[in-house]
Amino acid sequence: MFSKEKTILAYTVEKCPQCNLERKRKFKEGDFLFSETSKCDSCNGITVIEKIFGEPIEK
Amino acid sequence: MLIWIVPIVIFVFYGQRIQLSITSGEIKKGIKKLEQYKTNSRNELIEYVKKNMNPKDDPTKKIDRFLDYFTIMPVDMDPNGIVAKVRHIVRAREDYSRDHVKSLSPQTSALELTKIQTLLEIATSLQMIYKVINHLYLTAKKQNNYPLILPLQMILPFIMEEAEAMHKAIPAFKTGQPIGDGIGPMVVGKMMLDTKKESIAFQTVLSETQYDGRKLFLLKAEGPGSTVGRPGDAVESIVSKNKPDVIIMVDAALKMEGEDSATVAQGFGAAIGGIGTERFQIEDIATKNNIPIFAIVIKQSVKEAITLMTKEIADKADNVRLQIYEMIHDNTKPGQSILLIGVGNTMGVPQ
């Protein structure tokens, strides 16, 4: 009765298969799991989308 | 004395009417919300079709006609052969509604088509829920019948929970995000990467790999579209060519109240939801060929199952994969073959 409606934000987690570096960013339309996205920040590997999920944001 | 008698007389003669008016106030609020869900889902569907399918003509009229499609389930007085009849009717409905949606704009991609078909299913379900609940409410009001409104009052919270979940699922399907039910395909899809995939049944893919001296057949619905595939037909086809020694099914399962979300449990039997035709088919094949079926389920609520996957569920993917390998080790020997099925809607989950 008193529970507040929470806003859920979608996030994408990219992981570099070479150095295992993970980066969390906001979800963009066109993101699919396991697809290659960008160059890794720390090595020359190509990051792959590992997870897409929703998390509630605190207001 | 009169102060005591008057209320008693009022409650004796008008008690039910008073209760009816109090209860109907609560139900009315619920119906108003259901009407909002119904209208929103219809409007969002029309908007999405206009934006993503670019139809030549205004699709509103056609979509309104699609929303009114109904399904008459087969007679069950004689249950013999009813599963095949149900499967036939449900598949015919799916096939024809897919064709009808495609007719709005034939160049639409298969991915968009699956999304629109799911959005149409949501809007149709919300419309049906609203119509049925409103009918029950108006009938009780018309008859001034309090007992008639009681079952409605009891089921309404459950109906509202499902309707709210369906309404909240719309953004995930529009943007192609994986939903909670997609955890099975997500786990198996990752194992299928870098393997040769083949289409084994309608919207269902199979690939082969090796694990610790065992042959693994990996099966899931074809992603990243919004579909559950046809695992029943796929299992039938696989078993007729290469009989596996064990079947392992990974699926999302509804958690009980009080249970933690995203807990993983192992068990026996075919872990697959839906109306039961796919489960019947898989159980039938497994029984005829004496193949044991093991299941791994990831518990979640109705809402979690059909809305954007939560972090807790997504974080369990690696753990589930480990449990699959453990299960294979414990229940099979090197040289044997295992059919691993990732059951669920594969929206946003390729392979």
Image (tube, grey):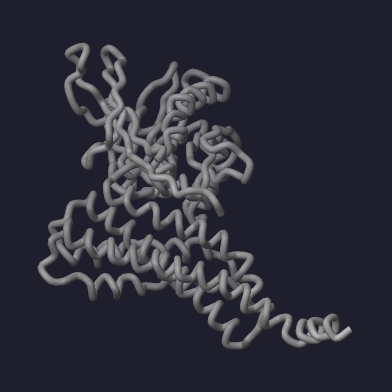
Residue drawn where x is 34% and y is 37% of the image: B206
Position of residue B163 relative to residue B235, above or below, is below
B64 and B195: which one is in front?
A: B64
B333 and B308: which one is in front?
A: B308
Give how far across and how far down residue B142 sits, in percent: 57, 87
Note whether residue B285 is visible.
no
Q: Residue furthest left?
A: B56
Residue drawn where x is 62% and y is 73% of the image: B23
Position of residue B103 relative to residue B191, above or below, is below
Give how far across and how far down residue B21 sits, in percent: 62, 78
Give how far across and how far down residue B85 sits, in percent: 47, 66
B284 and B32: which one is in front?
A: B32
Among the 4 quarters of the image, the one containing residue B223: top left
State left or right for residue A34 relative to residue B186: left
Position of residue B31 relative to residue B207, above or below, is below
Residue drawn where x is 17% and y is 56% of the image: B52
Among the 4 quarters of the image, the one containing residue B182: top left
Q: Quadrant of the N terminus of chain B?
A: bottom right
State left or right for residue B235 relative to residue B177: right
Give how far across and how far down residue B43 sits, in percent: 28, 65
Q: Quadrant of the C terminus of chain B?
A: top left
Residue drawn where x is 34% and y is 49% of the image: B227
Q: How many marks?
A: 0
Note whether residue B317 is visible.
yes
Among the 4 quarters of the image, the one containing residue B258: top right
